[in-house]
Amino acid sequence: MSKSAAPYSEPARAALFILVLTAWRVLTLAFDRTDLWVDEAQYWLWGQNLDWGYFSKPPLIAFWLAAVTELAGSDHQYWIRVSGPVLHAITGGLIGLTAARLYGGNTGPWAAVLYVTLPFVAVGSWQFSTDTVMLPFFALGLLAWTYLRVKPSLVWALVLGLAAGMGMLGKYAALYLPLLLATAALFVPSARIGWRDAAVSAVTAILVLSPNLLWNLQNGGTTFRHVAEDNAKLGEVLFNPSAGLEFVASQLVVFGPLLFGALLFALVTFGRRGPESRALLLLSLPVILLMTVQAARAGANANWAVTAYVAGSALAAATLGPRLLKISLSLGTLVAIALPLAYMTADRLRLPDGTLLAKRYLGPEALTVAAAETAKAENLSILVGVRRGVLADMFHTLWGEPFEIYAPPPDGKPRNFYEQTFPLPAGTTDDVLFVHSAPPDCEGAREVGAHAPNEGIYAGLRFGFWRMPATCLTP
């Protein structure tokens, strides 16, 4: 009996580890002392205005947050964030299944626990992002591929197409999935899937994504244009090699130094690797290389390569020896435990110079509350903000309050979601409370309050609250 139970001991231990770590993350989020980050508040607002697309991202995160907060009956930041650890746990489980199918043995359990303890997963289990809703579908697509590479299957072809389409509804970076599968098929014969299955997957993915494609067509390609012009800066010719090196260095933090080293070792020993490892390397490394070029060309955020670490986690688990695996898991677990302790004490934890460690995530709500109190004292119901972060927090913090919140009408192309969707309506004649760190260019403006915090994201800035006619902003 012990012999028959032995093969299940490692998967069971891995599942228990993931369950306990996820419970820790879910529990500690209830004691989080940080404010919603600008993007989180914006995604929540999208969920209150459901559509098939938005200024900067596709719509899945909006639908997801709308469903979670509706089921919870609350828009508190806990409910905005709490599904993050669960989604990453699901992603880790799918990666574990993928690694188990490719390598057998204990590689699957190791891949799963390595993923959930990755530094970027620790952050993604705290702050809710489009990566978090996209990655489970990316991982499901890779799992479907492990079946299709062995045997044609209409069911798994549909799963692959559904995963790719849903992933792209979460974040367009999921487009890497079919591109990477095609790249692996070019160089590793055993990574190829049948033409029928590939066609079924492609058609399914396009059908799933089609509502967003149609929305973009009807809205001037808003999201595509933002990604191309504002993020990738395709219209600019820039080159900064040091930025590319900085991006590579950032991946040591995002993925962990030992695991990133495992990918480099797999690259150096590519010719001696089995077909499974060669395929996984081609399903991960091209994203890192592409984003390194992008970083050198026009800049890139550290998280832009996270899709690489779905296959990368499985490959690292198969590449590192037991000792290095245990060291990497130990380091990752320490980070996973410590980060919640940091945001639970975010209003007290300081750097040696006295600065709050989490200053970037503190302060927006205090500014909103001060502005709202001033507006009430002035008997004003319209608030106008300029900064995206200010507007994001005002919408969330003041949701349900008797206020109307707007951005100034854009002078030309909208620069963000708020200018696109909530510009101050032309013809408004009431006075408004204008909230900004610079005085308005309007003779009719009168300062009636201010907020000048000593700590947090706005430390050192002075926000004035000006009462002014709306016509100052809507000539």
Image (cartoon, rainbow, N blue to C red):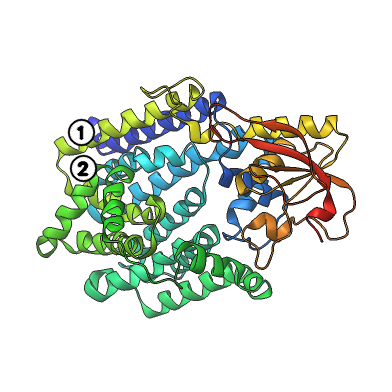
* Quarter location, residue 458: top right
Q: How many marks?
A: 2
Q: Quadrant of the C terminus?
A: bottom right
Circle on res. 327: 1
475, above or below 392, in the image: below
Give 79 or 297, whichever is nearer the viewer: 297
Give the Cα separation between the discs numbered 1 and 2: 9 Å
Residue 304 in picture, x, y percent from top left: 40, 55
The reply to whether residue 190 is visible in this rendering is yes
Residue 366 in picture, x, y percent from top left: 65, 29
Residue 440 in picture, x, y percent from top left: 72, 48
Q: Is residue 166 left or right of residue 138?
A: right
Give 412 or 105, whichever is nearer the viewer: 412
Circle on res. 217: none
Spot the residue most to the front. Answer: 443
Mark 1, Cα crowd under 10 Å, few <14 / some 14-19 / many 20+, is: few
Q: Is residue 102 left or right of residue 31?
A: left
Q: Quadrant of the N terminus?
A: top left
Marks 1 and 2: CB-CB under 8 Å? yes
Residue topped by disc 2: 258
Mark 2, Cα crowd under 10 Å, few <14 / some 14-19 / many 20+, is: some
Give the amino acid type for the residue marked by disc 2 in the picture: Leu
* Quarter location, residue 146: bottom left
**SS for dot 1:** helix
Q: Is residue 319 left or right of residue 241?
A: left
Spot the residue most to the top. Answer: 348
Q: Is residue 232 left or right of residue 440?
A: left
Give the amino acid type for the residue marked by disc 1 in the picture: Ile
**Residue shown at 60% from the left, 39% from the top:** 80
253, above or below 5, in the image: below
262, above or below 381, in the image: below
* Quarter location, residue 215: bottom right
